[in-house]
Image (spheres, rainbow, N blue to C red):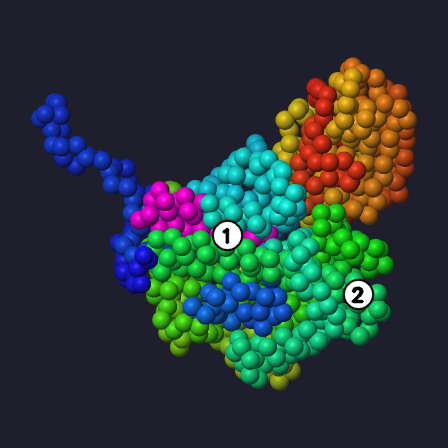
């Protein structure tokens, strides 16, 4: 039976501020033999401070303030409801407006630029605040808790490892295991296909599931439950830190069909009505003040009533898919919560449930998306094309994302969305904390202004742990967050901070003593950006003590206050490595043009052997905007000559070279829109052959066309021209495979993993010169 009370955490000074602890040395007298020596003794294992709680930290992805029912949204969240009833809701908790930056701040307690995560890892550049290489001076909460007696696990999404370090060649010191987590199960990257994911257990690639009903969120929950049960079975007196980071509700919006059908018809009245109804519910729940105003629809988003009937039908269905996705995720997190509550020490388990690492995402564009990689390659989509797939949304054939206006509605009552760090639509997320043994005012609301960086120092205080000044031999940057531990007991406790800067992609904000200066830069649904001058950018001003939703711009009324906050922003920017401001967008996704490190380096020829699978995109050959040749040295079997020889990418984009009944086939998947297919006329004879594909690039710019030539034994089998090619990146999460297809298929004509039935000796890829014409800025 779990105890109803827990001991007070030990005083922080009881743990050392230098980690690791010094090596043990026997303190007694040592003679010539053991008979003449003091009794032997072993060093005592490090124990957590007495009464230190178990910790379950749940972080959802791309979720808005007005999305889930616990904070007034229309997506049921019974797990959040239950935790809120027994704990506390926080309605002024802030993130950074983007995933990697928030996650770096969450695990280090430092501002995202201080931790070198100005953006996602795929946008890294070579400035201090922008490298996405977590400094060793920013030790993680996992490492500190581990060295103070905690069992640690990270399960789900890891978006804090440099892209060029995510292959099987390592290095692994910035994988989750190297960042202080004894166990890792999940994926490295910004998002992942939920039906056909590429996953790792610690450092090892996980074989694809054979379960026809497999779903990634369920798998994450299963692994979290398995780990925590095993850990507590083996070491019941040792506390755990379990960090569960779902891929939901980030695109792709993949969810079982039965969950989608639960919401049929519930969003037919559209996003404008949703916002109005949500604000009404929020006021009734008390999660927003009674006088909160609904902000105007963000500039550029269409009114629901301006749409035609087919658009309404498509967009309502996209929202039904998204709602099912979110509801399913909360239900799966409920299983994790239940498992933790069934273990010894349940009442002394601190559960932090954060609904989103930023606001809901507008990256589906104005008209919605079937392939999110279109956005990151700079291409818009058309609803007329997407409606053709309306009955397949949420399934394995698409990487779908709802329209931007639905994202805006998910962030009710605020303006803007993910990416826009100047406004609360991008940065304000629900947080719920449950700790039965220590929270007395159950079901209460807390309104202190908090930031993601405040989580780590709060955990240290609650656990009785001193933040180290030296960790693993490296002097540590000061923790920039402030503890809000007192707010768990006292609703009137002071907020831990009076000032906080915000910046993401040149969207800027500065909070100070109840005021917020806000300067949005670019709309988040357009990946293509023009030149921009920070000195000419418009700033807005809000008194958020009186205006919860940032509805009343007071810039004209209080220009002196606005000037003060603008000046403060530049001071904070210089202090925390925000500078230089960088407004480039999709071009930063191209690692080659940004000069990011690469395992392929400047090589123009790479040879791969059987067993090379799951190679990340960032470690794969750079084949965009140039001519190239693939040459496969293979043995063709006499019977059943089938299978993938080489593929790069998957359903979002890429290519595949395979045999079907002995016939060579090459597919070039242009961002899931066009799948140009070239085949030989007859099957190849059994025995050794050289199979090749040559691409002759037109050049003179990015994403131009070219011609494919398919050959066997040097003989031309077929040619085919394309008028456009992928300009930035083949795929978001899938790279190169030899001999099978790991992840999602490049087309849907073969069963996964489509293992080649013959023998592959080697595959060589030869690259021509990069040809993009005038280099983009």
- How far across and how far down the image is residue 188, in percent? 58, 44
The question of residue 243 being in magenta is answered with yes
Question: Along the line of sight, which residue is nearer the eye, 119 or 207?
Answer: 207
Question: Along the line of sight, which residue is nearer the eye, 179 or 645?
Answer: 645
Q: Quadrant of residue 491?
A: bottom left
- How far across and how far down the image is residue 526, in percent? 75, 60
Which range of residues does the magenta coloring cover? 227-247
- How far across and how far down the image is residue 543, in percent? 56, 80
- How far across and how far down the image is residue 425, in percent? 62, 68
Question: Along the line of sight, which residue is nearer the eye, 133 or 654?
Answer: 654
Quadrant in the picture for the N terminus: bottom left
Q: In the rendered view, would you say 74 is above or below 382?
A: below
Residue 374 visible somewhere in the drawing? yes
Q: For the view shown, which residue lies furthest in the left direction?
A: 36
Residue 362 visible somewhere in the drawing? no
Q: In the rendered view, would you say 721 is above or below 434?
A: above
For residue 313, the mark is 2
Question: Along the horizontal axis of the image, is 775 left or right of 326?
Answer: right
Q: Name the residue at 56% across, 71% down.
A: 71
Reading the image, the residue beneath label 1 is: 244
Q: Name the residue at 55% across, 62% down.
A: 355
């Amino acid at each position: 039976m779990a105890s109803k009370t827990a001991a007070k955490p030990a005083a922080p000074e009881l743990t050392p501020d230098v980690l690791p602890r010094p090596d043990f040395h026997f303190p007694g007298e040592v003679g010539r033999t053991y008979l003449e020596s003091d009794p032997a003794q072993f060093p005592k294992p490090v124990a957590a401070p007495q009464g230190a709680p178990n910790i379950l930290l749940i972080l959802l992805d791309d979720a808005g303030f007005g999305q889930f029912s616990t904070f007034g949204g229309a997506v049921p969240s019974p797990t959040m409801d239950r935790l809120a009833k027994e704990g506390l809701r926080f309605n002024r908790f802030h993130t950074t407006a983007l995933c990697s930056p928030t996650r770096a701040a969450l695990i280090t307690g430092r501002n995202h630029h201080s931790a070198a995560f100005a953006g996602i890892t795929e946008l890294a550049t070579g400035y201090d605040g922008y490298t996405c290489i977590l400094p060793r001076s920013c030790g993680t909460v996992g490492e500190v808790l581990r060295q103070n007696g905690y069992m640690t696990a990270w399960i789900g999404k890891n978006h804090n490892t440099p892209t060029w370090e995510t292959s099987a060649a390592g290095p692994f010191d910035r994988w989750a295991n190297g960042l202080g987590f004894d166990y890792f199960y999940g994926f490295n990257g910004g998002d992942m296909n939920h039906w056909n994911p590429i996953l790792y257990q610690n450092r090892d690639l996980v074989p694809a599931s054979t379960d026809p009903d497999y779903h990634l969120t369920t798998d994450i929950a299963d692994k979290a439950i398995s780990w925590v049960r095993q850990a507590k079975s083996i070491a019941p007196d040792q506390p755990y830190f379990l960090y569960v980071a779902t891929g939901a509700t980030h695109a792709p919006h993949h969810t079982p069909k039965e969950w989608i059908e639960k919401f049929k018809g519930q969003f037919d009245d559209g996003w404008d009505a949703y916002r109005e109804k949500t604000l009404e519910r929020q006021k009734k729940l008390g999660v927003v003040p009674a006088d909160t105003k609904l902000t105007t629809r963000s500039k550029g988003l269409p009114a629901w009533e301006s749409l035609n009937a087919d658009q309404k039908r498509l967009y309502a269905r996209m929202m039904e898919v998204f709602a099912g996705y979110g509801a399913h995720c909360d239900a799966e997190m409920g299983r994790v919560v239940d498992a933790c509550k069934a273990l010894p020490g349940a009442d002394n388990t601190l559960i932090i449930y954060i609904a989103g690492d930023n606001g809901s995402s507008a990256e589906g564009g104005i008209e919605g998306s079937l392939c999110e990689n279109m956005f990151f390659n700079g291409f818009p989509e058309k609803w007329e094309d997407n409606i053709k797939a309306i009955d397949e949304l949420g399934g394995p054939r698409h990487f779908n994302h709802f329209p931007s206006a639905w994202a805006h509605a998910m962030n009710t009552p605020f303006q803007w969305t993910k990416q826009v760090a100047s406004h609360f639509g991008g940065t304000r997320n629900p947080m719920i904390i449950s700790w039965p043994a220590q929270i007395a005012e159950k079901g209460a609301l807390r309104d202190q202004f908090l930031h993601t960086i405040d989580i780590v120092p709060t955990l240290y205080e609650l656990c009785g742990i001193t933040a180290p000044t030296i960790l693993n031999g490296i002097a540590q940057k000061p923790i920039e967050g402030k503890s809000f531990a007192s707010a768990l007991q006292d609703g009137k406790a002071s907020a831990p901070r009076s000032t906080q800067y915000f910046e993401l992609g040149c969207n800027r904000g500065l909070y100070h003593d109840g005021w917020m200066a806000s300067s949005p830069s670019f709309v988040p649904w357009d990946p293509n950006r023009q030149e921009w001058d920070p000195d000419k950018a418009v700033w807005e001003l809000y008194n958020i003590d009186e205006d919860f939703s940032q509805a009343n711009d007071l810039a004209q009324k209080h220009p002196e206050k606005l000037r003060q906050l603008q000046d403060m922003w530049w001071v904070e920017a210089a202090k925390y490595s925000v500078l230089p401001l960088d407004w480039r967008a999709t071009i930063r996704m191209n690692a080659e043009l940004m000069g990011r490190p690469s395992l392929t380096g400047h090589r123009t020829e790479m040879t791969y052997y059987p067993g090379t699978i799951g190679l990340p995109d960032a470690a794969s050959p750079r084949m965009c905007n140039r001519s190239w040749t693939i040459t496969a040295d293979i043995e063709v079997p006499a019977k059943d000559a089938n299978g993938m020889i080489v593929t790069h990418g998957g359903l979002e984009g890429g290519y595949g070279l395979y045999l079907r009944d002995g016939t060579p086939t090459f597919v070039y998947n242009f961002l899931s829109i066009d799948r140009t297919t070239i085949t030989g006329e007859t099957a190849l004879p059994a025995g050794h052959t050289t199979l090749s594909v040559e691409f002759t690039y037109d050049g003179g710019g990015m994403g131009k066309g070219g011609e494919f030539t398919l050959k066997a034994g040097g003989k031309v089998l077929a040619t085919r021209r394309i008028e456009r090619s992928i300009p930035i990146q083949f795929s978001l999460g899938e790279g190169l495979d030899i001999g099978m297809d790991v992840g999602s298929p490049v087309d849907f004509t073969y069963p996964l993993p489509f293992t080649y039935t013959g023998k592959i000796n080697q595959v060589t890829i030869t690259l021509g010169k990069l040809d993009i014409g005038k280099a983009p800025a």
